[in-house]
């Protein structure tokens, strides 16, 4: 039972990070019908920016509590990611809104490579250790262990996803986003500024990616220029698993993907004598994704297909 609870906790931690990044994918797809494959590298930029801020704080204010340093690092990483994502939308995607779908897809891959190259030039090739600012002593939960960093991650993810749901469902901007996703032409005729909505969508996605990036680096104790590729790919898979274009599907898909990886690596790894252990945990996520898409191509909660007529 202790092992099962531990795997569940690990899966929830991992799934929360996937869900935050998956929301960025699904919101952009819902509004623009575009897959922003550079979004995983925005996570990387957030991790690197947060790491830089933490190193500065270690020199300037070493006596600050660890949780305060983490919050400052996240708050500092958010505007960096927002600016990067808005520039990406303005420079790379805006002119291609009415282009064939292959053009923005290729552009997104090019932007991803560009961001990785720029990060490599700024921060170098080698992984950078993440400072141990949070307490290292784990807490006991029903016989399992969870670190203070993981507790903070779960709380931040829950708060961020809750605030996003409130924004989309209860605010004027949320209504404008839903209207633009449903039919941008009609929304424009009703007075909705589609450019403003799209920029806000990219900004919100970047905010969530910044939180996920800093917490990802803190959880795994390092960051490097190529760290965003695999989490970005898995987060995109989580968005598809839950139902691309559906924010609640992205949340559910991210959590499920994290649980599948954690439980698969733990239990199937034991059944195979460790052959399919943690080094092969990617297999479980993508096998389940293939099965779900074969049986239900629209995802678990259904894809929200906007009316572009």
Image: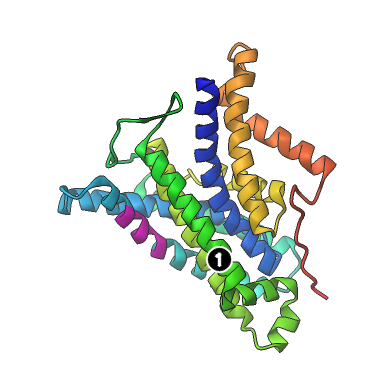
User: Residue 23 is drawn in which quadrant?
Assistant: bottom right
Relative height, residue 198 to residue 251 (above, below): below
Q: Position of residue 216 (x, y in %)?
A: 44, 43
Q: Is residue 210 left or right of residue 92?
A: left
User: Residue at 79% of width from left, 43% of height from top?
Assistant: 293
**Which residue is disc 1 drawn over?**
166
| Residue sitting nearer the eye, 199 or 108 | 199
User: Residue 191 is drawn in which quadrant?
Assistant: bottom right
Q: Is residue 266 left or right of residue 295?
A: left
Relative height, residue 214 to residue 131 (above, below): below
| Residue sitting nearer the eye, 295 or 199 | 295
User: Residue at 76% of width from left, 56% of height from top?
Assistant: 303
Q: Position of residue 4 (x, y in %)?
A: 55, 24
Residue 28 visible somewhere in the drawing: yes
User: Residue at 26% of width from left, 46% of height from top?
Assistant: 66
Dot 1: what SS?
A: helix
Residue 122 visible somewhere in the drawing: no
What colour-coding does the image apply? rainbow
Relative height, residue 32 to residue 210 (above, below): below
User: Residue at 29% of width from left, 54% of height from top?
Assistant: 53
Instruction: Pick the quarter of the image with the N terminus.
Output: top right
Which region shows up in magenta? 71-79
């Amino acid at each position: 039972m202790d092992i099962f609870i531990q795997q569940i906790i690990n899966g929830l931690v991992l799934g929360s990070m996937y869900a935050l990044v998956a929301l960025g994918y699904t919101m952009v797809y819902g509004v623009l019908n575009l897959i922003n494959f550079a979004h995983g590298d925005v996570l990387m930029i957030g991790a690197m920016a947060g790491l830089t801020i933490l190193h500065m704080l270690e020199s300037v204010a070493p006596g600050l509590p660890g949780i305060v340093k983490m919050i400052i690092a996240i708050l500092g990483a958010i505007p960096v990611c927002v600016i990067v994502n808005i520039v990406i939308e303005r420079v790379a995607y805006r002119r291609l809104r009415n282009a064939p779908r292959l053009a923005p897809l290729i552009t997104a891959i090019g932007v991803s490579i560009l961001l990785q190259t720029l990060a490599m030039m700024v921060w170098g090739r080698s992984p950078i250790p993440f400072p141990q600012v949070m307490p290292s002593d784990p807490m006991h939960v029903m016989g399992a262990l969870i670190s203070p960093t993981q507790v903070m991650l779960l709380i931040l993810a829950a708060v961020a996803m809750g605030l996003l749901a409130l924004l989309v469902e209860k605010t004027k901007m949320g209504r404008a986003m839903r209207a633009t996703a449903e039919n941008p032409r009609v929304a424009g005729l009703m007075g909705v500024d589609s450019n403003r909505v799209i920029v806000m969508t990219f900004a919100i996605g970047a905010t969530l990616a910044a939180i996920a990036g800093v917490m990802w680096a803190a959880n795994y104790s390092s960051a490097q220029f190529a760290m965003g590729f695999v989490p970005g790919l898995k987060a995109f898979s989580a968005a598809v698993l839950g139902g691309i274009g559906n924010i609640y599907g992205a949340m559910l898909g991210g959590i499920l993907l994290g649980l599948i990886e954690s439980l698969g690596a733990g239990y199937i790894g034991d059944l195979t004598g460790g052959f399919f252990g943690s080094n092969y945990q990617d297999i479980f996520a993508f096998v389940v994704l293939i099965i779900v898409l074969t049986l239900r191509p629209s995802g678990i909660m259904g894809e929200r297909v906007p009316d572009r007529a």
